[in-house]
Amino acid sequence: MCGRFAFYSAAEAVSDLFGVNDAGLAVTPQYNIAPTDLAAVIRLTPAGERELTMLRWGLVPFWSKDRKAASRMINARRETVAEKPAFRKAFRERRCIVPADGYYEWVAGESGKQPYYLSSRDDRPLGFAGLWERWREPQTQQSLETFSVLTMPSAGHIANLHHRMPVMLDDVTAEHWLVGGEQQNPPALRELGAEGRADQLRFWPVAKTVNNARNEDPRLIEPLPDAEID
């Protein structure tokens, strides 16, 4: 799964990589994005243009009676996303890209779970396949927009850390993913990122201070002393 991630690249880098027409949104660097936090996503406007906006992590289905589901629906499985009631409509109609510079995984060891940070070997931002949804509070009709990250079975050396990993998009698959709509073939879209792009990732152990979601500091992603980078 993907339970924490970081996004600290400049908006210009996201614009260059993902073709956002207006990346002028001021996004504060985040090194410890946790469920229910606000995070940047890229989606299509009604006019068909890409926009960078802030949504809350943890999808609340449009039919939900309350927002309690948010903390549980941070990830959607690629294998079942087209059928699950919570995700299937968003999968057809409201897909997005979640820009990230890296994400965290925890590995059990003799001294407890050790956090690792995974990022691109070329230091460029990653693009996770995501879904977004708009939910209205029944009493007040106040709108809440949320998102979930699509995951798939881990590939290559990433499987040594965790059995799941985010579905990562490149320039071509990002275009197909964002289009959405009934004219697209959900089974084919579900295969996007099937190769995993795991060979483009590296990882290293980091300090356990990342375990506390309130901690927010660039030092969270720094390798431990004498750590090996895989």
Image (tube, rainbow, N blue to C red):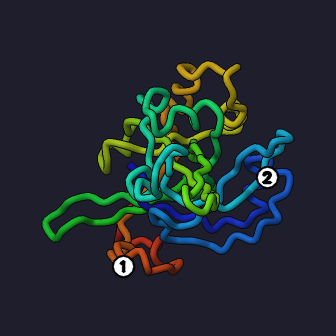
Q: Is residue 146 visible?
A: yes
Instruction: Compare marks 1 and 2 and give the one earlier in the sequence.
Output: 2
- Residue 86 to residue 138: above or below: above
Q: Secondary structure at mark 2?
A: helix
- The three-letter code of the residue at mark 2 reads Asp
Q: How many marks?
A: 2
Q: Nearer the viewer, residue 81 or 19?
A: 81
**Residue that lies at the very extreme toward the front in this rendered image:** 139
Viewer-proximal residue, 136 or 87? 136
User: Can you name the residue that lies furthest to the left here?
Assistant: 110
Disc number placed over residue 16 in the picture, else none = 2
Give the residue at mark 1: 209
Q: Is residue 68 left or right of residue 11?
A: left
Residue 156 image position (x, y, % from top left): 38, 38
- Tell me how far mark 1 sits from mark 2, CA to CA: 32 Å
Tell me which residue sits at (37%, 36%) in the image: 153
* Amino acid type assigned to the residue bearing label 1 in the image: Thr
Residue 197, how many percent across, how many down? 52, 38
